[in-house]
Image (cartoon, rainbow, N blue to C red):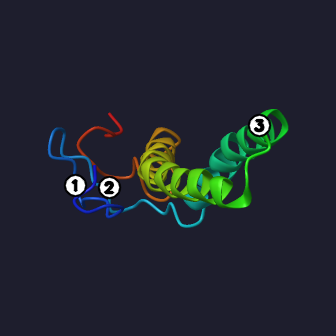
Amino acid sequence: MFYKYLKVVDQCSSCGEDLHYQRADDAPPYLTIMAVGHIIVPALFIVERLWKPAIWVHMAIWLPLTLVLTLALLPMFKGAVVGLQWALRMHGFGVSGAFHSDQ
């Protein structure tokens, strides 16, 4: 679906569906922030409560983990948003295309 990290191809190589209609905009970053926050914050509090590590240990653990999770989840959420737009025929999906013909 992507030809770069977050750049969606104009057309699906398998079925020929036009994907240039997608308008993911701010939804993928929002969903990524929500997901990463719901993973990192409880984990941080649990580690702090159980072991009470120094601040530098927290920084060494949570900053890289937050970065890795964010970079890993962002393309997945963007793909999910584009897929949802396609399934709901939003933003021009379904008007013309290989898979969505009105027959």
Residue shown at the point (54%, 67%) measured from the top left: 25
Image-quadrant location for residue 26:
bottom right
Q: Which mark is residue 77?
A: none
Q: Which residue is mark 3?
A: 51
Image-quadrant location for residue 20:
bottom left
Q: Which residue is mark 2?
A: 19
Label 1, residues with CA under 10 Å away: few <14, some 14-19, many ≥20: some
Q: Say left or right for 90 vs 101.
A: right
Q: Amino acid under label 1?
A: Gln
Spatial CA distance of label 3 from label 2 is 49 Å
Label 3, residues with CA under 10 Å away: few <14, some 14-19, many ≥20: few
**Which of these two is toward me, 78 or 44?**
44
- The residue sitting at the left extreme is 13
Q: Earlier in the sequence, mark 3 or mark 2?
A: 2
Label 2, residues with CA under 10 Å away: few <14, some 14-19, many ≥20: many
Residue shown at the point (44%, 57%) measured from the top left: 92
**Which of these two is toward me, 65 or 12?**
65
Q: Cβ–Cβ below 8 Å for labels 2 and 1?
A: yes
Q: Say left or right for 61 vs 46.
A: left
Tell me where residue 73 appears, x and y as whole percent: 48, 47
Q: Amino acid under label 2?
A: Leu
**Residue 63 against residue 83 in the figure, above or below:** below
